[in-house]
Image: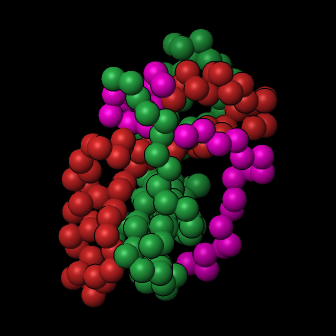
Chain colours: A green, B red
Amino acid sequence: MARVVVDVMLKPEILDPQGQAVANALPRLGISDVSSVRIGRRIEIEFTGAADPERVREIADKLLANPVIEDFVIQEVDEPAAVPAGDPS
Amino acid sequence: MARVVVDVMLKPEILDPQGQAVANALPRLGISDVSSVRIGRRIEIEFTGAADPERVREIADKLLANPVIEDFVIQEVDEPAAVPAGDPS
């Protein structure tokens, strides 16, 4: 079972209003040393068998990212999904 | 100048309809060996100076993630933002 992570971010030259909104909200939290915030998507894909990099590329290109305004990076992650330490509630 | 990446994902027990929609679309692309797709957010924060991990934690907790349904992971990235190879168009 293979796990692949695809990070999709807006290209650097594309304006990111969502990130801008977060950056503008930071001074209200007392944080003034942040120069930029960019918000993208992180997609975790789990394969039943081995992951074919060409196939992942196709999924990212056709289904996950808009190649006109977004860049994507594919990383293969070997270990199973990290399970966070148990929450008592 | 420090760069920090915050990955925000829905907790494993929370249903992810967006990821489900992608998973359901994959057979139409001829891909049938994907067992799960989860979609979260990747936030890149650039600081003018050094990044204070406690501060990043506060930003993530108060502004970026909903701790009731989401988990976040903070990674410090040392190198400046990767610039993708020039696109001829």
Which image quarter is the C terminus of chain A in? top left
Is A24 above or below relative to A27?
below
Q: Residue B30's quadrant in the figure?
A: bottom left
Residue under the image location 26 percent in, 50 percent down: B16
Residue A50 appears left or right of B89: left
Q: Nearer the viewer, residue A17 or A1?
A: A1
Q: Which residues are magenta?
A: B61-89
**Rendering coords of residue A38 (x, y %):** 54, 43
Residue under the image location 41 percent in, 45 percent down: B9
Confirm whether residue A49 shows in the render: yes
Residue B74 covered by magenta stretch: yes
Residue under the image location 66 percent in, 32 percent down: A35
Is B22 above or below relative to B28?
above
Residue B87 appears left or right of A52: right
Residue A31 covered by magenta stretch: no
**Rendering coords of residue A70 (x, y %):** 48, 63
Q: Residue A12's quadrant in the figure?
A: bottom right
Q: Nearer the viewer, residue B5 or A15?
A: B5
Confirm whether residue A72 shows in the render: no
Q: Nearer the viewer, residue A16 or A47?
A: A47
**Rendering coords of residue B48 (x, y %):** 75, 31
Is A38 above or below relative to B56?
below
